[in-house]
Amino acid sequence: MEIQKYQKKIFEDIKHINEHDEEYWEARELMKVLGYSKWSNFKKVIDKAKISCNLSGNKVEDCFADVGKPITSGKGRVELIEDYHLTRYACYLIVQNGDPRKDVIALGQSYFAVQTRKMELTEEEFSRLDENQKRLYTRINVRNKNQYLFETAKNAGVKNYGKFNNAGYKGLYNGETAKDIAKRKGIKETDDILDYMGSEELGANLFRITQTDAKLKRDKINTEEDACDTHYHVGAAVRKTIGNLGGTMPEKLPTPELSIQELEQNELKKIDGIGSYVLLM
């Protein structure tokens, strides 16, 4: 009951009603409530939420109404203080792409939950996306689920996340570590290998991530060694399933030419267009 009151208070207090009796939230107010101190960091979350909105078939401009106002500096330069009026669905997508380690993010996910339209696409809707859109959509899900997995791993006693992460990759990729995968793909060790996977390879990793998260919780794993063993065996089980279905092993799948970051930038250019204002952070 206390949590419900807390949810209602923090998000209801910043809710606005327009002249059409429609509710909306201002992005910069939501940013503070969600624990972000810099607009530049929060804008990255908004951008990912916009991509999710577009992929789900909703009009971005309807959910993220740009209300930034140009101002003229003392030197006569036109600058834009960026802000948005957000629908409940836009807020839902923002908290879905936010940092799950923040308690208020979990509260927001509950408060802004939309029953009529979830972020997840139906199988039919997903099938209509092109490969790049499938990559973007699946990468967003992988990013979100990975954050929850690492939180679960932390609660299970994991301190060495590199070791834990590699255990899952070794199971799925027949002994390859993240470093091995990066070398095979011809990318830098500092690059995130997940950003250089096609939708099929990302899908295999999404299954590995969600099933490991569930098993760690179900089996009440409480040591780092057991958590790593669990991650390895889940990865190996996913690999075995791919083989049983006659699928292509992940290390045999092609590496896309464009990274996820490049695809996101291309998608945002299509959504937002190329502005001429200098943004005031």
Image: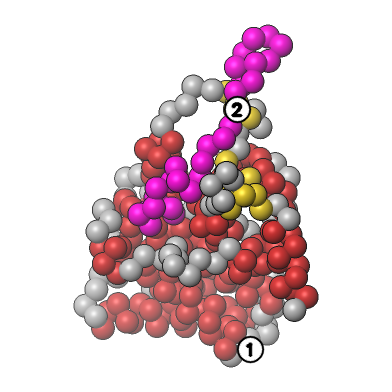
For residue 221, above or below residue 201: below
Position of residue 188 in the picture relative to residue 219 (left or right)? left
Q: Which amino acid does label 1 sit on?
A: Lys
For residue 76, above or below residue 82: above
At mark 2, the secondary structure is strand
Q: Does the magenta stretch include residue 57?
A: yes
Name, please, the residue furthest toward the right: 2
Foreground pick, 17 / 201: 17
Name, please, the residue furthest toward the left: 246
* Residue to which mark 2 is pinned: 69
For residue 30, above or below residue 141: above
Q: Does the magenta stretch include residue 123?
A: no
What percent of the width, then of the height, locates residue 81? 63, 30
Q: State the residue at coordinates (39%, 52%).
A: 58
Quarter of the image with the C terminus is top right
Foreground pick, 216 / 7: 7
Task: Point out the stretch of residues depicted in magenta.
Answer: 52-79
Q: What residue type is labelled 2?
A: Lys
Q: State the residue at coordinates (67%, 67%).
A: 107
Quarter of the image with the N terminus is bottom right
For residue 75, above or below residue 211: above
Crowding around mark 1 (Cα neighbors within 10 Å: few <14, some 14 to 19, many 20+) is few
Name which quarter of the figure residue 129 lies in. Answer: bottom left
